[in-house]
Image: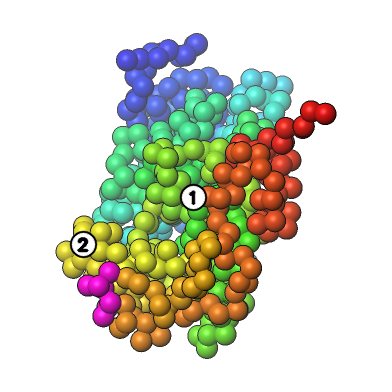
Amino acid sequence: MAVTLKGDQEISNTPTIEAKSLRINLNKNIYGTFSEIGAGQETVRNFFRSGGSSGTIAKAMSAYDKDFSDAIYGIEDDKRYVTETRLKKMVKHEINLMEERLSRAKDPDKLFFSYANTVQTIDFAKKFKGHGWVGIRFQLDPLEDYNEVVLHLRFKETDATLQQETLGKLGVNLIYGAFYLNDNPKDLLISLYDNLHKDQLEIDMINFSGPRFMYVDNRLMSLQLVKNEMTNAVMFDASGVNLLPAQELYKKNILTHRGSFRPVTKVNMDIYENAKKLFFKENKVDKENTKIIFEITLSNLRADGKINERDFLDRAELLCSLGQNVMITNFKEYYKLTEYFSEFTKNRMGLAMGVDSMVKVFDEKYYRNLSGGILEAVGKLFFKDLKIYMYPSKQTNATEIITSKNLKVHPRMKELYKFFKRNGKLVDIQEYDSKILHVNSKTILEMISKREKGWEAMLPEGISDLIKIRKLFGYSPPRSRKN
């Protein structure tokens, strides 16, 4: 199958890197610069090789020497070079130079762009595979402001030459997507892996900005990264800006609260507040060096068989309104989540959870894919510097409150559970609000769908107002009674 765009040659739905480069080169209006630091001029090389590049490439440079690079782009406060701030300085600086040096009167239809990457490839000892920032600043109309797409990648290959080639292909895909797939950011995102494989690189953050992307919710783009298996975890802050997990979690104490948050309830926030108090009392925890995360697993988002993006954004809206950092992961099992965090920190971690989640931790069916079964999974949790803070449970109309002392696990798991508990890994949350133990998201959603009253009291302050104003979770006002 092929597609044809006006003024361009026919291309296949998945064109080769050479075909993409040539198509850009043959577009007489696309004109820009390439600034590549850390892995050679791998992206621009593809444009030189494909032919017809004289009308596309304004300048190609590699400011490898740090002093020379600082003289061009300035000195970073943290003295680092492979950073998002460095990348953004690079693309803005080069665009400004083009605007200063080239006359718009001579070329009124030119669409300027500035592509840049700043990366660190695999080290000599091959212990650190490398990572980098890649981005493009570009315009789609000479009279419009510039758009930007910025992403972070982690190399998976163990050879520097292969990493360079991978980076070059990714760069071509990004530039091509910016000019020809900008009307559908989801397609642009997927196209970044054209002629590449997910075994070659991981993309763990991306942000779109500018007039052509005003409608893009970057949180939804984060979800696409996990959904398309480009990465296992993404993160965004209370303002909805995508964050780089490795940067946010580096050498931090981490407290994580997993839930469906559909919607976030008073119980969720009571777990959060009490777990936070207990976590901050730990000797090894520095309050100023702690990152608290509300985490939702992809399996939770697929509760109905497929991912409902509107439903995801509804949950995100409410958590962000409470000032929380949100993480979406592909880690159904807790041990995988803690292993992921361990890539970035050796400091103490905490997991806040309810009784139902604790029961699942000791359910064998979740570990059948492990050669060591549940012993391997619990062992991985046990040997991390980890504490689990468990919130009690009380069934509707029941009198017994379930804590770690009377929690029932499978008979085969009793001794393992006792061993885990004896070693101080499990801490009961004791200062809980007994009046809200019955609250759960499922009941709230049923009440909203049936237009019943009273669900508002089960939610944190301000959340019910947001649900009503924005009509989240299918909310509609109660029917007025006829006289």
Above or below residue 27? Residue 137 is below
Q: Residue at x 49, y 25 (%)?
A: 180
- Please state if 77 lies on the left or on the right of 399 as rendered: right
Q: Between residues 411 and 378, which one lies in front from this camera angle?
A: 411
Where does the image place residue 10, in percent across and percent down from the top left?
38, 13
Residue type beneath disc 2: Leu
Mark 1 element type: strand
Q: Mark 1 points at which residue?
A: 205
Using the rendered image of the protein, determine whether residue 234 is visible from the camera's viewpoint: no
Q: On the image, which quarter does residue 346 sit in? A: bottom left
Above or below residue 206? Residue 25 is above
Mark 2 element type: loop
Q: Between residues 182 and 113, which one lies in front from this camera angle?
A: 182
Q: Name the residue under label 2.
A: 370
Using the rendered image of the protein, determine whether residue 287 is visible from the camera's viewpoint: yes
Residue type beneath disc 1: Met
Range covered by the magenta-colored residues = 410-416
